[in-house]
Amino acid sequence: MTFGIVVFPGSNCDHDVYWGLKKELGQNVRFIWHRQRDLEGSDVVVLPGGFAHGDYLRAGAIARFSPIMESVVEHARQGRPVIGICNGFQILTEIGLLPGALLRNESLRFAHGLVRLAVQRTDTMFTRQFLLGQIIEMPIAHGQGRYYAPPQILEELEAAKQVLFRYCDVCGQAASEANPNGSTNAIAGLCNAQGNVIGMMPHPERRMNQRLGGIDGQLLFLSVAQSVSGL
Amino acid sequence: MKPNPPVTLSLAQQHGLSEEEYNRILAILGRVPTYPELGVFSVMWSEHCCYKNSIAHLKTLPRKGPRTLVEAGEENAGLVDIGHGLAVAFKIESHNHPCAVEPYQGAATGVGGIMRDIFTMGARPIASLDSLHFGPLDNARNRFLMDGVVRGVGDYGNCLGIPTVAGETIFHDGYSTNPIVNCMAVGVVKKDRIASATAEGEGNTVIIYGSRTGRDGIHGATFASEEISEESEAKRSSVQVGDPFAEKLLLEATLELVKSGVLVGVQDMGAAGITCSSAEMAARGKSGISINLDNVPLREKHMSAYEILLSESQERMLAVVYQGRIEEAEAILDRWEILHERIGSVTNDGKMRVSFQGSEVCDIPAWELALGGGAPVYHREARRPAILDEYNDADLTPYRLDRNWNVALSQLLASPNICDKGFITGQYDSTVRTNTVLGPGGDAALLWIKETTLGLAMTTDCNPRFVYLNPRRGTALAVAEAARNVSCTGAEPIAITNCLNFGNPYKPESFYFFQEAVAGMGEACRILGTPVTGGNVSFYNESEETSILPTPVIGMIGLMEDVDHAVRSHFQKEGDVVILLGKTKADLGGSEYLWHLYDVLAGDAPELDLELEKRTQFVLRKAINSGWVRSAHDCSEGGLAVALAECCLLDPEHPIGSKINIKPGNLTVADLLFAESASRIIISCPAELKDEILNLAEFMEVPAEIIGEVGGDRLVIADWIDLSVNELIHIYYQALPNYFHNIAIAQ
């Protein structure tokens, strides 16, 4: 199986995802330039972090018009996995593959730091290798990461258990001090109703090596690899 | 378009040229210069471009070492060999003047400019550092400056995807109208892919690529070579506007161009834009260059030759492409959707020729314009200010009296110069690129070089109070501290870059600080074995009311063979033994203790024995790389007590106390706790390994003593200090947000 990493001109976590998948997990990985239309047989599509087209307008607002996105939407419609990390999450909400929007952080400042996440579900293709309620650590690095959805949609996605990761404190509780950007319901990552598209603000690709602080991110990619290869 | 004004001596003087310089121009050309030529000379001969008042001193610095691949000044940045077929390019630069009037864009373009210096060498930037100095935050203007600068540094680096991993933030009244903003970038390049900023080979094509040329930043270089005044505000248009997204494209495209082998040379357009890049490339290649300004893509209509030549629009590059490979180069630039245009060719007549709308507007021997060529070199007068003797001889006895030491330590931990800077560094992405092993908040940052086991450490350091009291020793202390910080991770210091921020060089009492600082830097670098690979000079950091403290910022890099041997700054484990390497002396002069608690800047800078410093750091590194050490922290601002508190609280999620037993001997308690004696490091180690360290220290004739033990939830220092670590954490981490939001702190 192959991971395809979509590269926009302003992507800057593309190489980090590549490194993590290739060198740490031994997966097949290829870069897909955003002007292409062909996903070149990718089984899992990753939209990496960065500032796709500078994002001076609104994060992800222009990226959704890149030629490759039609194929990404089609890939998702077929029920095949799509992972959006940080800017990738923003793009997925802009193009409508995921509900809601990412607003500017409550602090109105860019925020970098290590956050704790409580794993909400382990029966999805992205989280099957985690333990239910497991508390994991990953860095965030974003200016627009405050998840928002209108009350009705929020209710729906909570009812459908689409939230996969919530910001939490050391005890696994969603305390306000543990919420780095003011996200509604402490949502850090969620999936679509079908469960094959995930968007998350924290960076799993930055937690792939003990030397760099930990390996919690590996479980996400291993989960999806396991799901796709049907093991 | 307005007609060009007639060129006269008075016009030249308005351009910042002296009468003597104007006469030299007449002699070089054998005629009166054209208006564009006058503009070209004025920027190329400004301090910013040609270092005319500083180069004579800079040349005394040690610039060669076993690892140096290019010497200071030869290329855009210094280059050192780190083995494994790799080299590191790094450099620091100031963007003080732009930040004084427009902090956000000033800082952003500061980062952009230094990044271009790195990737024009073919190196991929891997880290950014920032050394920031502001006036006190009880002033709204200073808060505005800090906020803008931090956002500017952050937004640019974050968008570009280069982690900002280290730096420092220092507050002092002298920086109120003159903030100091120094940005450092570090990049890695394969040794067979190093690019040069040269123009060679007659007939090779000169191209410009990147953003369009606009009217922004005209005369930025000249602006930076004047004092800040009311009129500076009116020069706001001299500040350029940054576009990190455009820079990201330039970065990727430039590295691809270098890799493809189509380039003879490439240089970024920083200060003085097209003028500086073309003249310097030609001078370096001992060639000439011929440019047609009609082909330069413009942002605005009706720009004159003068404006196009001097524009400092950001995110532009000048490259020389081999004949026959131009289409290949253009295809790469097209793929990155970067605007590019052929604007000229390399010639062999040694001249910089510029044509515009059918006539030749410049015809100048390129060599005459460049640093190391015909640019003027001055030896400025230096005079030691008499007041320094008064400061040095000041009686510090009143400040050494006994007081409540718990309160003193608590207050010092809340000092903006000491407290946690997470409010700033939390706005910087410090982990993108997934190399960061040690990020902000420790002694130095440490990055893993992937595909190897190498670790690359980096830091910026300067204690401007020491430099003010004793510029020579103070600067040597800055080099020593930078090296010590690098050594605290376990890495060996290998080279430095420097950013020399001073006042007006035409004032002898101001120039004295510069001259002495360079001498002190040279001494320290010679003994510590860290050559100076490049740097930057920023004079005129003064206004009518204030002048900065002399601020020679040292940017240092270090190398460790096995990054997994790295240690952190803070205590790790209950029961570990605490050892102090080095000796505390009565060095209260210039300390944060005097400054923060008594508002006093007096005394002399701490003593420094560079040979002892070198041996101490050797012992430290040897102990770390032998696996004997669990943590290592430099003992500097705030002295031993503050360093010990930091060892307890630097990981606020896992605070850990310690019990310290030290005796004053001949020292007062104030000195013992808060003197900032050099060459001291606090290390912790498992009890069974302490003798290894003590024996090595004894063998190397480095003072070392066991001063206590890690454990508990309080920091206890003999009979003087007894505080809960949680209390210390609260003080240390809340201070800066409180200062910034101007919340009064109960003293």
Image: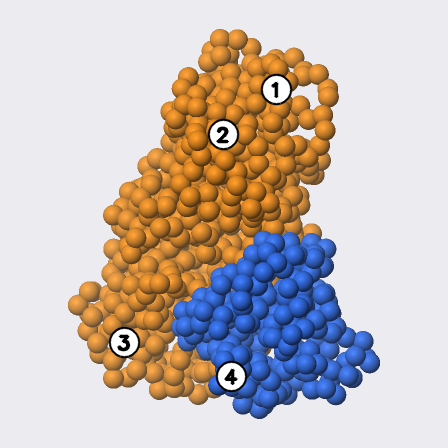
Query: Is residue A71 rendered to the left or right of residue A158?
Result: left
Mark 1 touches mark 2? (CB < 8 Å): no
Give the residue drawn at x 82%, y 81%.
A152
**Which amino acid, by three-letter code, is at mark 1?**
Phe
Mark 4, residue position: A230
**Which amino acid, by three-letter code, is at mark 3?**
Trp
Q: Secondary structure at mark 2?
A: strand
3 vs 1, front mark: 1
Indicate the quadrant where residue B425 lies. Answer: bottom right
Query: Which chain is displayed in blue in the rendered image?
Result: A
- x, y percent for residue B90: 42, 49
The answer to whether residue A203 is visible is: no
Give the residue drawn at x 64%, y 54%.
A53
**Which amino acid, by three-letter code, is at mark 4?**
Gly
Marked residue chain, label 2: B
Does residue A71 sit above or below A76 in this rendering?
above
Same chain for marks 1 and 2? yes
Marked residue chain, label 1: B
Q: How is the image coloured?
A: by chain
Same chain for marks 2 and 3? yes
Indicate the quadrant where residue B483 lies. Answer: bottom left
Mark 1 touches mark 4? (CB < 8 Å): no
2 vs 3, front mark: 2
Q: Earlier in the sequence, mark 3 or mark 1?
A: 1
Mark 3, residue position: B628
Residue that lies at the very extreme toward the bottom in this rendered image: A132
Query: Which chain is displayed in orange in the rendered image?
Result: B
Tell which of A49 and B697 is nearer to you.
A49
Q: Whole-Å distance between the Cαs marked 2 and 4?
A: 56 Å
